[in-house]
Amino acid sequence: MTVYETEVRQNVSIMGNGTSNGGILGKLRVNGDGRIYGDADCLIFRCNGSAEVEGSLRSRETRVNGQLNVNDNLEAEQMKINGGLKAGGSARIGHIHVNGDLLIGNTLSSVKLTVNGTLEARDEIGVENLTVRGKIKAGRALYGREINIKLHGGSSQVSRMTGESISVSISRLARVIGSLHITSLKTGHIEGDDIFLENTIADTVRGRRVTIGRGCVIGLVEYSEELRTDRSAEILNAERI
């Protein structure tokens, strides 16, 4: 029996412009412009419009059509965001799908994370399965089992990337609108088993099976099984280890 099931929770709805205290809640709904004072712990959070939580937010299921700002930490099992989500602290989310912007002030951890837009965390991002169509920024490391980044919308930057399978490529949108020259990912170090890169600027790339595609500028490539390179890629040094 989970903690959700053992507590008596009241439902809260904000219609239009309004405020409410946080606390232990069942369903928390905002239709309009709502402000929640303090921490909120709820089973279901719904927002159609804009909402600000002046504390931490914990929920089982969250859906937002609009903008949600959480001043402190965020914890959720399932999230669907159409618009924007910003958390000032750390975020721990099971499964999340974002069409828009996801901005985290500290660390971000997730099981499955899909972003069509912008993903940004000031500290590190740890996720089992990551898909980004747009741009990504992480102040420290990005690590996961499967990392799939399709670049468009400007430059991306990550201090280091680690994963089993890593793919960084140009999105179809970037190819169509001809923004290849301004769409790139910059990082210090990439390490994984299977690595495919396009439009990537990196100091070091280390992997078992590595493909360096067009638009890449790499200082050192270390590989143990296979290295494939596009003739337009710039590689200063390549070593089999």
Image: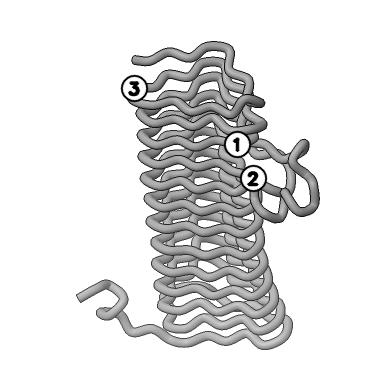
Q: Are marks 3 and 2 in contact (CB under 8 Å)?
A: no
- Residue plotted at (52% across, 33% down): 140
**Hey, which residue is sitting farthest front in the picture?**
231
Counting from the top left corner in percent of width and height, residue 24 is at 41, 75
Q: Secondary structure at mark 2?
A: strand
- Which residue bears the numbered disc 1? 198
Query: Along the line of sight, which residue is nearer the eye, 62 or 135?
Result: 135
Q: Are marks 1 and 2 in contact (CB under 8 Å)?
A: yes
Give the Cα separation between the discs numbered 1 and 2: 7 Å
Figure check: 24 above or below 121: below
Query: Along the line of sight, which residue is nearer the eye, 111 or 197?
Result: 197
Question: Would you say 162 lies left or right of 52 here?
Answer: left
Q: Amino acid at mark 2?
A: Ile
- Which residue bears the numbered disc 2? 170
- Residue plotted at (37% across, 50% down): 128
- Which residue bears the numbered disc 3? 224
